[in-house]
């Protein structure tokens, strides 16, 4: 599956492959096939070289808290995600510092910037969600 390319799986929803990876319990983000730049979120063209061919690669399960926030009043409601909850921007040193967003395992979590955390997949009723914990 990592050999599949975003251009082969775009169906009007560029995140379909993201959710397919999470459903498999694997965290994958896009990587440019030309200059090898990591990119999250998926883009049509690489900002570094303009290449439009991407590969989804496994980034493992370790990350570092770049920033976080506790959501008390959400601007968008999602089924199965009731406030309060904690969202973190997690940096991936193993992917040249690419960052993605994950939900803290517990709403009582008080992450600190620079903390090393573990990423894992929580299977929800309608979709899988990326979560992090110490
Ligand atoms: Zn590139």
Image (cartoon, helix red, strand yellow):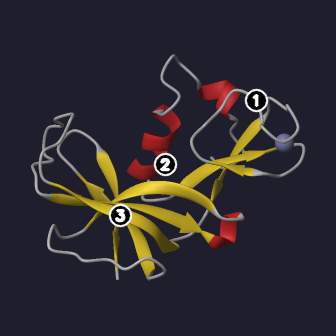
Q: Which is more foreground, mark 1 or mark 2?
A: 1
Pointer 3 residue: 68
Mark 2 sits near ligand 1, with its Cβ under 8 Å away: no
Q: Considering only vertical position in the picture, is 36 above or below 8? A: below
Which residue corresponds to the image point at 15% horizontal and 47% vertical from the top-left?
81
Q: Secondary structure at mark 3?
A: strand
Pointer 1 residue: 45
Q: Secondary structure at mark 1?
A: loop
Task: Determine the image quadrant of residue 10.
Answer: top right
Numbered circle sitting on residue 108: none
Locate residue 103 relative to residue 65 in the image: left or right: left
In this rendered view, identify the residue nearer to me: 1 or 31. Answer: 31
Which of the two discs, 1 and 2, labels the residue nearer the N terminus?
2
Locate residue 73 relative to residue 48 in the image: left or right: left
Which of the two discs, 2 and 3, labels the residue nearer the N terminus?
2
Q: Quadrant of the C terminus?
A: bottom left
Pointer 2 residue: 21
Neighbor class of circle 1 (other Cα within 10 Å; few <14, some 14-19, many 20+) is: few
Which residue corresponds to the image point at 78% horizontal and 36% vertical from the top-left?
46
Task: Determine the image quadrant of residue 127.
Answer: top left
Which residue corresponds to the image point at 18% horizontal and 70% vertical from the top-left?
106
Q: Considering only vertical position in the picture, is 63 above or below 72? A: below
Residue 76 placement (x, y as % from top left): 21, 33
Q: Which is more foreground, mark 1 or mark 3?
A: 3
Which residue corresponds to the image point at 74% horizontal and 38% vertical from the top-left?
54
The residues bearing labels 1 and 3 have C-alpha atoms spaced at a distance of 28 Å
Q: Secondary structure at mark 2?
A: helix
Residue 71 placement (x, y as % from top left): 19, 53
Residue 66 placement (x, y as % from top left): 49, 68
Locate residue 69 relative to residue 114 in the image: left or right: left
């Amino acid at each position: 599956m990592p050999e599949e390319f975003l251009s082969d799986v775009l169906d009007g929803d560029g995140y379909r492959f993201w959710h397919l990876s999470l459903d498999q319990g694997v965290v994958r983000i896009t990587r440019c096939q030309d200059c090898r730049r990591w990119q999250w979120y998926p883009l049509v063209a690489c900002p570094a070289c303009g290449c439009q061919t991407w590969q989804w690669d496994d980034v493992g399960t370790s990350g570092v808290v770049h920033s976080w926030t506790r959501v008390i009043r959400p601007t968008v409601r999602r089924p199965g995600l009731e406030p309060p909850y904690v969202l973190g921007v997690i940096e991936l040193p193993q992917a040249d510092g690419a960052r993605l967003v994950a939900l803290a395992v517990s709403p009582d979590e008080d992450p600190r910037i620079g903390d090393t955390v573990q990423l894992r997949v929580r299977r929800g009723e309608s979709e899988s969600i990326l979560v992090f914990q110490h």
